[in-house]
């Protein structure tokens, strides 16, 4: 009998800055300077986001969405999914102790 495959190696958590760089800036040939100039996001902030040192805020999400033709929700969802995965990884044992409340 065949067993269904299981995934033992978890993929690394992807920071929204990686998506910004690899899926938008590089393929579209947009420099950090150009993005900064046309969105009024400080270059230092963009660099911190790309390096995974800073989060995408609501204001930045709106600016990125206007510039790239996406939605602000796209950028905020990337950030929220990243944050949730980080938090779950850091506190997995602690969270597993919490049991579903059963009411009658």
Image (cartoon, rainbow, N blue to C red):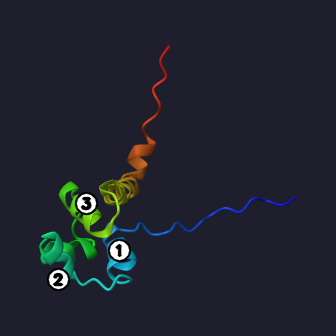
Pointers 3 and 2 in contact (C-beta within 8 Å): no
Task: Give the crowd class for mark 1: few <14, some 14-19, many >=20 residues within 10 Å.
Answer: some
Is 35 situated left or right of 24 in this image? Answer: left
Q: Please provide percent x and percent y for residue 1.
A: 87, 58
Q: Is residue 54 above or below residue 31?
A: above
Q: Residue at x 21, y 63 (%)?
A: 63
What's the mark number on residue 61? Answer: 3
Q: Nearer the viewer, mark 1 or mark 3?
A: 3
Q: Which secondary structure, mark 2?
A: helix
Q: Which secondary structure, mark 1?
A: helix
Q: Which residue is mark 2?
A: 33
Q: Nearer the viewer, mark 1 or mark 2?
A: 2
Which of the 4 quarters of the picture holds residue 81? bottom left
Is 59 situated left or right of 88 in this image? Answer: left
Is 100 situated left or right of 26 in this image? Answer: right
Q: Nearer the viewer, residue 52 or 19?
A: 19
Q: Residue at x 45, y 26 (%)?
A: 101
* C-alpha span from label 1 to label 3: 15 Å
Instruction: Tell me which numbered mark, 3 or 2, is placed earlier along the sequence.
Output: 2
* C-alpha span from label 3 to label 2: 17 Å
Q: Which residue is mark 1?
A: 18
* C-alpha span from label 1 to label 2: 17 Å
Q: Nearer the viewer, residue 81 or 23?
A: 23
């Amino acid at each position: 009998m065949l067993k269904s495959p299981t995934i033992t190696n978890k993929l690394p958590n992807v920071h929204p800055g990686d998506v910004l760089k690899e899926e938008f800036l590089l393929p579209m040939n947009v420099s950090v300077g150009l993005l900064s100039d046309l969105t009024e996001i400080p270059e230092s902030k963009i660099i911190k986001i790309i390096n995974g040192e800073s989060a995408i805020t609501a204001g930045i999400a709106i600016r990125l969405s206007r510039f790239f033709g996406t939605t602000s929700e796209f950028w905020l969802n990337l950030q929220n999914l990243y944050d949730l995965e980080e938090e779950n990884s850091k506190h997995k044992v602690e969270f597993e102790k919490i049991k579903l409340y059963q009411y009658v």
